[in-house]
């Protein structure tokens, strides 16, 4: 039998909600939505009737009716018999339509307003939770057209290949060789994206309760994969650039940098089984690790017996032309993850692992418990894209530079209290907020037409409430709309400190 919530119980959960800053129905809907997303009100729970709740809260029935209607419009409340709607989470079907989530799902440990896999953004909402680009259309289409002509030759075979198609592995190996890292096809394992690659690696090298070193902040889905495997994430915080001896030349707020002393000490003392790092335009900070630190990192991992896993998904998005060597150039023991998702299109779902032949065989064996290989058609197309990887990049990088400049100018003009470093590449800006309001901003952002990924989503233990990742993947006119919405959302929080304190306590949703 599905649960129901009586009005007095809901009133206790709501606490102090009617602050008079916004219309009462909006404030009521905000807090109910938070309770659902926070897991304090379970999904498929029948809310009190409009009449009984209005009596319990001491507000007009019109206020409750409007709040329930607002929740239904957002997809958080079903249209039940009378006014007894049941709590839901909006989701996205494969066709892109918003549906209600399955009863019984929980949302504990997620952040309101951020995007989870499959969670729909209502029409007209600007989505800043994703840091991804649209497809490099003509290039991708041409690759699939070529793949279609090559497919018939492969049809007599079984279509299963845990290593991946040889032409694609050869193309990826050639890219590494051209970058100064001699590589053969036998050192490449094709995967269904970078996240799939990381899951395979963790399954092969780390067991439950094993320590995995991570940067702090780090890529949220990587943290999820480490937790899901039962491993213990050991975070190492970034430091201010001046602490690392690399002050910013423009006199702006100090950028973040890798704390090599802390990384080396953690490896020496904790002896983690594995380390996961993003040295190329780090997600979310956008920082680029210098070669001298790459050498230090490799040596520290070797001394500790730690498998060093390097995520190079963003390496091609080099906006300022800085030159660094792939980390694998400093040691044959490095395990590298690559992908076409950021350089070409996330919808390709094609990635790879580069490692020694021995490790690749180990990963291939671990992979068979997850799947038997990737889609053949996509791999044929990916081989064409990898061989011509540089073709779409100049135009994409030029657009990203313009977007980055526009976003930084907009943030400086409309949100001068936010500290924003200038990323050397990648897709986003890591902003330091003037107050710990990241989750609160994320909760109310949809009311202003935007969707965000809260700072704590990138950390462990609730860290980064003073930070927000803002992608510059949208064109300048949309970025302007988004920044103006951020300004309005912050103004609302500034006018309602109690609301800010209430919303701060929500943990984070998964994002992409």
Image (tube, grey):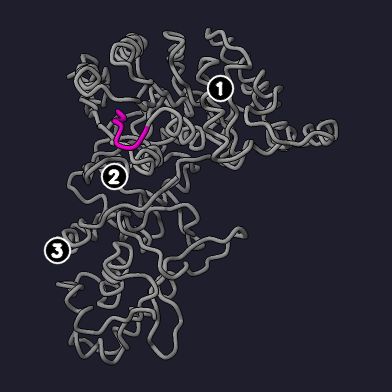
Q: Looking at the picture, how far across and down is residue 213, in whole percent?
A: 29, 28
Q: Which corner quadrant holds the C terminus?
A: top left
Q: Residues within 10 Å of mark 1 (few under 14, many from 20)?
A: some
Residue 76, image quadrant:
bottom left
Q: Which mark is residue 209?
A: none
Q: Looking at the picture, how far across and down is residue 247, in whole percent?
A: 22, 18
Residue placed most toward the observer, 84 or 314: 84
Residue that label 1 marks: 361
Q: Of callouts 2 and 3, which one flags the residue occurring earlier in the amino acid sequence?
A: 2
Q: Residue at x 46, y 20 (%)?
A: 335
Q: Residues within 10 Å of mark 3 (few under 14, many from 20)?
A: some
212 drawn magenta? yes
Q: Residues within 10 Å of mark 2 (few under 14, many from 20)?
A: many
Residue placed most toward the observer, 1 or 259: 1
Residue that label 3 marks: 498
Q: CA distance from mark 2 to mark 1?
A: 37 Å
Q: Of callouts 2 and 1, which one flags the residue occurring earlier in the amino acid sequence?
A: 1
Q: Residue at x 22, y 44 (%)?
A: 461
Q: CA distance from mark 3 to mark 1?
A: 56 Å
Residue 196 to residue 63: above or below: above
Is residue 459 something that shows in the picture? yes
Residue 298, image quadrant:
top left
Callout 3 secondary element? helix
Q: CA distance from mark 2 to mark 3?
A: 20 Å
Q: Which corner quadrant holds the N terminus?
A: bottom left
Is residue 323 something that shows in the picture? no
Callout 1 secondary element? helix
Magenta stretch, residue numbers: 207-213
């Amino acid at each position: 039998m599905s649960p129901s919530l009586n009005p007095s119980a809901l009133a206790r959960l709501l606490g102090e909600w009617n602050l008079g800053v916004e219309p009462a129905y909006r404030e009521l809907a905000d807090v109910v939505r938070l309770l659902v997303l926070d897991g304090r009100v379970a999904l498929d729970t029948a809310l009190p009737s409009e009449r009984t709740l209005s009596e319990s809260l001491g507000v007009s029935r019109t206020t409750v009716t409007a709040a329930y209607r607002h929740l239904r419009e957002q997809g958080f409340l079903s249209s039940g018999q009378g006014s007894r709607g049941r709590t839901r989470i909006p989701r996205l079907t494969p066709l892109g339509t918003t549906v209600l989530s399955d009863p019984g799902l929980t949302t504990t440990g997620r952040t309101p307003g951020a995007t989870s896999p499959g969670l729909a953004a209502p029409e007209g909402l600007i989505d800043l939770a994703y840091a991804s680009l649209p497809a490099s259309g003509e290039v991708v289409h041409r690759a699939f057209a070529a793949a279609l002509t090559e497919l018939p030759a492969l049809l007599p075979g079984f279509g299963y290949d845990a290593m991946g198609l040889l032409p694609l592995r050869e193309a990826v190996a050639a890219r590494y060789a051209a970058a100064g890292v001699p590589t053969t096809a036998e050192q490449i394992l094709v995967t269904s994206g970078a996240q799939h690659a990381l899951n395979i690696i963790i399954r092969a090298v780390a067991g439950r309760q094993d320590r995995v070193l991570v940067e702090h902040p780090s890529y949220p889905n990587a943290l999820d994969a480490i937790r899901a495997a039962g491993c213990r994430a050991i975070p190492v915080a970034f430091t201010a650039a001046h602490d690392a001896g690399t002050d910013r030349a423009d006199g702006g707020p100090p950028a973040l940098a890798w704390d090599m002393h802390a990384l080396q000490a953690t490896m020496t003392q904790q002896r983690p089984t594995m380390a996961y790092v993003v040295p190329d335009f780090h997600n979310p900070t956008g920082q680029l690790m210098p070669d001298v630190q790459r050498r230090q990192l490799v040596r520290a991992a070797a001394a500790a017996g730690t498998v060093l896993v390097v995520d190079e998904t963003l390496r091609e998005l080099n906006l300022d032309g800085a030159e660094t060597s792939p980390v694998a150039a400093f040691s044959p023991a490095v395990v590298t993850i690559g992908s076409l998702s950021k350089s070409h299109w996330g919808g390709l779902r094609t990635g790879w692992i580069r490692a020694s032949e021995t490790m690749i065989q180990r990963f291939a064996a671990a992979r068979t418990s997850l799947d038997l290989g990737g889609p053949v058609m996509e791999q044929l197309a990916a081989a064409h894209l990898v061989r011509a990887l540089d073709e779409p990049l100049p135009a994409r990088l030029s657009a990203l530079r313009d977007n980055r400049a526009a976003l930084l100018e907009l943030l400086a003009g409309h949100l001068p209290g936010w500290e924003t470093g200038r990323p050397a590449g990648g897709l986003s800006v890591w902003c330091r907020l003037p107050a710990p309001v990241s989750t609160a901003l994320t909760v109310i952002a949809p009311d202003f037409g935007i969707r965000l990924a809260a700072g704590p989503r990138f950390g462990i233990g609730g860290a980064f409430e003073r930070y927000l990742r803002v992608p510059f993947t949208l064109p300048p006119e949309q970025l302007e709309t988004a920044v103006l919405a951020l300004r309005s959302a912050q103004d609302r929080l500034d006018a309602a400190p109690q609301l800010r304190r209430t919303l701060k306590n929500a943990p984070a949703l998964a994002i992409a």
